[in-house]
Image (cartoon, grey):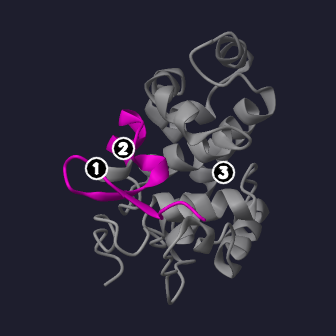
Amino acid sequence: MPPEPLVVGPDGLSRPIWASTDPVLQAYYDTEWGMPVRDERGLFERLSLEAFQSGLSWATILKKRENFRAAFRDFDPEVVAAFDDDDRARLMADAGIVRNRLKVDATIDNARAVIALRDEGGLVDLVWSFRPEVTPEPLTLADIPTTSPESVALSKALKKKGFRFVGPTTMFALMEATGIVDTHLLGSHRRGTSGVWA
């Protein structure tokens, strides 16, 4: 028999099982996941963290988030775009983050791509332009897709602009995290709270 799709916590609120036990994940789920992110720095941070998460658990990234913010100077695109070989060496020696050379280099390159996009409307307008007309209405975690036509198209658009580690699955996760789609389970206390989807 499949597990119950939602868990009712001691506070009486219904959450998916992944957000029901770990306090860090629960706080993230309750206050941030799925809420609209419409500022450049915030979106660059989310895009960067989703890239670092690839192949790892989201809990790992969340628990290192403040370390990432310190290491990447609060994800200020202009500061990160100016990182040099000394910064790369510093990042690769920082045990507080995920030390993956390809992802570190991609984050620096992506910061440069963010700046280049400013002449064309910016990262926020580009990413949000891929908001679909409808959002999933999942009853169980198995009902939640891992990609969508829009995340495939967003991935292609970003790659054309020089971004890396922006595959369709990673971009769908970004869209979930930033409110572009609402994949909160039906019955969750967070369903529909973003203001993006009625």
What type is the residue that disc 3 sits on? Answer: Ala
Residue at left offset 22%, top offset 46%: 10
What type is the residue that disc 1 sits on? Answer: Gly
Q: For this view, does 90 lie left or right of residue 71?
A: right
In the picture as drawn, the residue positioned furthest to the front comes out as 1
Q: Nearer the viewer, residue 196 or 19?
A: 19
What type is the residue that disc 2 sits on? Answer: Gln
* Residue wearing tag 3: 113
Q: Nearer the viewer, residue 13 or 32?
A: 13
Specify which label sits upstream in the sequence, 3 or 2. 2
Question: Looking at the picture, how far across and down is residue 28, in whole percent?
Answer: 37, 45
Quadrant (top left/top right/bottom left/bottom right) for the C terminus: bottom left
On residue 159, the disc is none
* Residue wearing tag 1: 9
Tell me, yes or no, whether the two marked residues, 1 and 2, touch with CB atoms within 8 Å. Answer: yes
- Please give the count of numbered marks on the rendered protein: 3
Magenta range: 1-28
* Residue wearing tag 2: 26
Residues at marks 1 and 2, CA–CA distance in whole angstroms: 10 Å
